[in-house]
Image (spheres, helix red, strand yellow):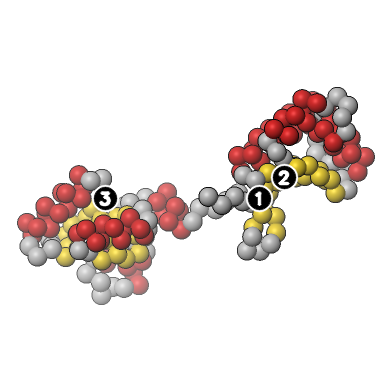
C-alpha cells in the first residue's frame, strides 16, 4: 500500500513565536520532553520556515495524531495560530493541498443513491428474466426488470465485470442521467437505477 505524504502546518504570528513553539515540540530540550517523545514515537519530522512550523507524517492517521498533539500544546501555551491545517502532498501537481479529499465519481453517485455501473441482461424468456432478477436481489443487488430486460446496479467497474461474466450480461456506466444521451437504448427508462 502506497503512503501519501502529509504535514500539519502551523502559522504563528512571528518567527520568534515559531522558534518558541519549536522548543516546546522538542527541538529545544527544556520542558517539552513528553511532547517530544510523543512525536518521536510516531517518527514525525518537525521543521520551521520563518513564522511557520511543519510536522511531517507518512499517513493521514499519523497527521491526525500529530494534529491532536500540536493542538493540545497550542492550547497549553495559549497560542492561536493564524493558520492551522493538515496538508497532503499531491504528486501529480507537485504541491501541498489542504482541501479535503473529494469523493471520486463512483462514490459520489453511490452517496446519491445511483449505481455508477450497471450490468444489463436480456433474458430469453419472461420466466428466465424473473428468476434471474430474484436471484440477483437475493444476492444483495439492486435490480430492475421490465419484460425480459434486467439491470443490476454495481458499486464498481470490477464488481460489474464479475457479475456480467457470471450472468452473461454487458457492463455499462450507470448513473442518473447517462441514458438521456442514448434514447435508442431499450434501457433508457431505467436511467438512475439505485445502487
Residue 54 position, x and y percent, is 77, 44
- Identify the image quadrant of residue 95: bottom right
In the depicted view, which residue is nearer to us: 171 or 183?
Answer: 171
> Alpha-carbon distance for marks 2 and 3?
44 Å
Disc 3 target residue: 142
Marks 3/1: CA–CA distance? 38 Å
Query: Residue at point 13% right, 63% down?
Result: 123
Mark 1 → mark 2, Cα distance in angstroms: 8 Å
**Dot in front, 2 or 3:** 2
Position above or below: 86 against 79: below
Give yes or no for contact between labels 1 and 2 (Cβ–Cβ under 8 Å).
yes
Q: Residue 164: which quarter of the image? A: bottom left
**Marked residue nearer the N-terminal end (2 or 3):** 2
Given residues 193 and 36, the one toward you in this image is 36
Q: Relative to 32, is 177 above or below?
A: below
Q: Which residue is mark 2?
A: 56
Identify which residue is drawn at 61% across, 51% down: 4
Residue placed under numbered mark 1 in the picture: 5
Is 28 displayed left or right of 90 in the figure?
A: right
Q: Nearer the viewer, mark 3 or mark 1?
A: 1
Disc with the residue nearer the chain's start (3 vs 1): 1
* Foreground pick, 4 / 136: 4
Q: Determine the secondary structure under disc 3.
A: loop
Q: In the displayed structure, does residue 83 sit left or right of residue 111?
A: right
Residue drawn at x 82%, y 33% is 26
With respect to residue 169, does 153 lie above or below?
above
Label 1: how many residues lie within 10 Å, few (<14), some (14-19) or many (20+)?
some
Dot 1 lies on which element?
loop
Amino acid at each position: 500500500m502506497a503512503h501519501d505524504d502529509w504535514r500539519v502546518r502551523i502559522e504563528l504570528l512571528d518567527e520568534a513565536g515559531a522558534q518558541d513553539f519549536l522548543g516546546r515540540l522538542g527541538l529545544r530540550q527544556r520542558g517539552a520532553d513528553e511532547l517530544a517523545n510523543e512525536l518521536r514515537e510516531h517518527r514525525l519530522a518537525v521543521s520551521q520556515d520563518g513564522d511557520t512550523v511543519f510536522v511531517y507524517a507518512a499517513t493521514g492517521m499519523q497527521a491526525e495524531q500529530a494534529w491532536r498533539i500540536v493542538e493540545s500544546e497550542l492550547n497549553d501555551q495559549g497560542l492561536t495560530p493564524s493558520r492551522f491545517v493538515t496538508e497532503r502532498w499531491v504528486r501529480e501537481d507537485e504541491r501541498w493541498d489542504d482541501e479535503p479529499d473529494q469523493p471520486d465519481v463512483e462514490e459520489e453517485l453511490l452517496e446519491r443513491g445511483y449505481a455508477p455501473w450497471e450490468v444489463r441482461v436480456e433474458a430469453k424468456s419472461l420466466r428466465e428474466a424473473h428468476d434471474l432478477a430474484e436471484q440477483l436481489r437475493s444476492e444483495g443487488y439492486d435490480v430492475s426488470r421490465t419484460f425480459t430486460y434486467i439491470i443490476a446496479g454495481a458499486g464498481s467497474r470490477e464488481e460489474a465485470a464479475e457479475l456480467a461474466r457470471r450472468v452473461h450480461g454487458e457492463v455499462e456506466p450507470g448513473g442518473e442521467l447517462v441514458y438521456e444521451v442514448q434514447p435508442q437504448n431499450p434501457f433508457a427508462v431505467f436511467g438512475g437505477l439505485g445502487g
